[in-house]
Amino acid sequence: MENKPLENLEIEGKSSTFFIPTVSFNAQTGYCKIEGESYLENTWEFYDKLTNWLKAYAEEKKTVTFNFKLTYFNTSSSKGILDILFFLKEYEAEGNPVTVNWYYPEDDEDNLAEAEDFIADSELEMNLIPY
């Protein structure tokens, strides 16, 4: 049986009772982006899907560039984000190139503080980029 190549992961963001962030993971380039607001009904299921995609991508041992541009996320989403960061730290520790960029509104000190907490918790270097 032939291995099927990993496909891009695209999730269109939605805003209603719950907020689903836009996700764009590129299987060819390793460019991954999650942006918008993350306040989900099935947070674990959503972030497990993202982490599982990253694990499949990691089998290729290629570069990952991960861009977070979340304007809001709830507590359960922050656990999913941290799981992604822990995975990326592990991937990097295995000798793989990882770049993580955290974009935050320049007037949002809470968002910046959350990013700094993620850095401390995951021990993963991140570029903090105001916009």
Image: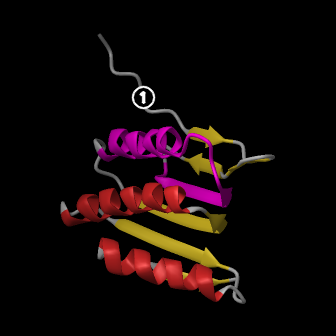
Is residue 10 within the magenta segment?
no
Residue under the point 51% across and 33% down: 7
- Residue 13 located left or right of residue 54: right
Query: Which sits in the foreground, 38 or 100?
Result: 38
Residue under the point 40% across and 22% down: 4
- Residue 88 located left or right of residue 70: left
Confirm whether residue 44 shows in the render: yes
Query: Which sits in the foreground, 2 or 11?
Result: 11
Quadrant in which residue 82 is drawn: bottom left
* Position in image of residue 83 (x %, y %): 37, 56
Part of the protein shown in magenta: 29-58
On-image quarter of the N terminus: top left
Residue under the point 32% across and 71% down: 122
Q: Residue furthest right?
A: 16
Is 61 placed above or below 123 here? above
Q: Amino acid at mark 1?
A: Pro
Quadrant in which residue 99 is drawn: bottom left
Q: Residue furthest top?
A: 1
Residue bearing the label numbered 1: 5
Confirm whether residue 124 shows in the render: no
* Position in image of residue 41 (x %, y %): 62, 42
* Position in image of residue 64 (x %, y %): 41, 58
Quadrant in which residue 70 is drawn: bottom right
Is 51 placed above or below 121 here? above
Q: Secondary structure at mark 1?
A: loop
- Residue 117 located left or right of residue 73: left
Q: What's the colour scheme?
A: secondary structure
* Position in image of residue 97 (x %, y %): 32, 65
Is residue 52 within the magenta segment?
yes
Residue under the point 18% across and 60% down: 94
On-image quarter of the C terminus: bottom right
